[in-house]
Image: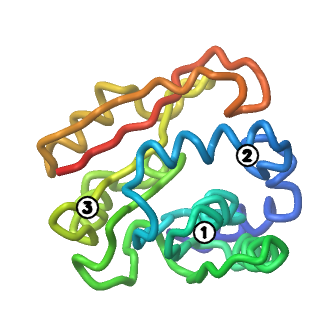
Amino acid sequence: MGVDTREMWDGQAATFDDEADHGLRDPQVSNAWAALLTAALPAAPASVVDLGCGTGSLSVVLAQAGHRVRGLDVSARMLEVARRKATGHGVDAAFVHGDASHPPFRPASFDVVLARHVLWALPEPRKALARWVALLRPEGRLVLIEGRWATGAGLSVPECVSLVREHRRETDVKLLDDPALWGRTITDERYLLLSRG
């Protein structure tokens, strides 16, 4: 990602968590995400990389559940917030500065690759997805949270399934229309795609 992208996300770091599904400050929203992710992930402790982790809210939720979590983000300011958040919640999560398109990790080093609202925004999603899948151990799980937003941007379910099936055999999709996840009623398409292999 270019300097403009990093600067954009750095500029949003101070207010990013104001959105209910970003900051997970509301216990009902936080609990809804914890339940959703617990159902998608293997039993703890699993090794999880949270690509495009932003301010680390999902990383913290997963660390609280007993997983070994590494978060990666292109925004240094977002990562500062993520580190403070993890410390404030008394959990151990490692945060790394880097580009989700080119994660700086060894192949086959994670049980889970998680990315929320990241794939749709990348300039070359196919290539990024190939790199993400390479990070997984043989029985690893790919967990993508994506959507086709009201603005028209994003990835539809068929588009995302098609991308993943270029690299993985299995795809299970769960629509995420529960207002508890977002802190409000939503009308656009949001979903979790889980691939176990």
Q: Measured from the top left, where is residue 166 in percent x and y? A: 14, 46
Corner quadrant of residue 128: bottom left
Neighbor class of circle 3 (other Cα within 10 Å; few <14, some 14-19, many 20+) is many
Q: Spatial distance from mark 1 to mark 3, Cα to Cα?
A: 18 Å
Could you tell me which secondary element the residue under label 2 belongs to? helix
Q: In the displayed structure, would residue 47 be above or below residue 123? A: below
Q: In the displayed structure, would residue 106 be above or below residue 11? A: below
Image side of residue 44 versus residue 61, left or right: left
Q: Spatial distance from mark 1 to mark 2, Cα to Cα?
A: 13 Å
Q: In the displayed structure, would residue 57 be above or below residue 190? A: below
Q: Which residue is mark 1?
A: 63
* Of the image marks 3 and 2, the number of the one nearer the N terminus: 2
Could you tell me which secondary element the residue under label 3 belongs to? strand
Residue extending farthest to the top is 187
Corner quadrant of residue 83: bottom right
What kind of residue is marked 1?
Ala
Q: Measured from the top left, where is residue 160 in percent x and y? A: 32, 36
Count how many numbered circles sit on residues in the image.
3
* Of the image marks 1 and 2, the number of the one nearer the N terminus: 2
Q: Which residue is mark 3?
A: 140
Residues at badges 1 and 3 in contact (C-beta under 8 Å)?
A: no
The residue drawn where x is 71% and y is 32% is 182
Neighbor class of circle 1 (other Cα within 10 Å; few <14, some 14-19, many 20+) is many
Q: Which residue is mark 2?
A: 30
Residues at badges 3 and 2 in contact (C-beta under 8 Å)?
A: no
Q: Spatial distance from mark 3 to mark 2, Cα to Cα?
A: 25 Å
Could you tell me which secondary element the residue under label 1 belongs to? helix
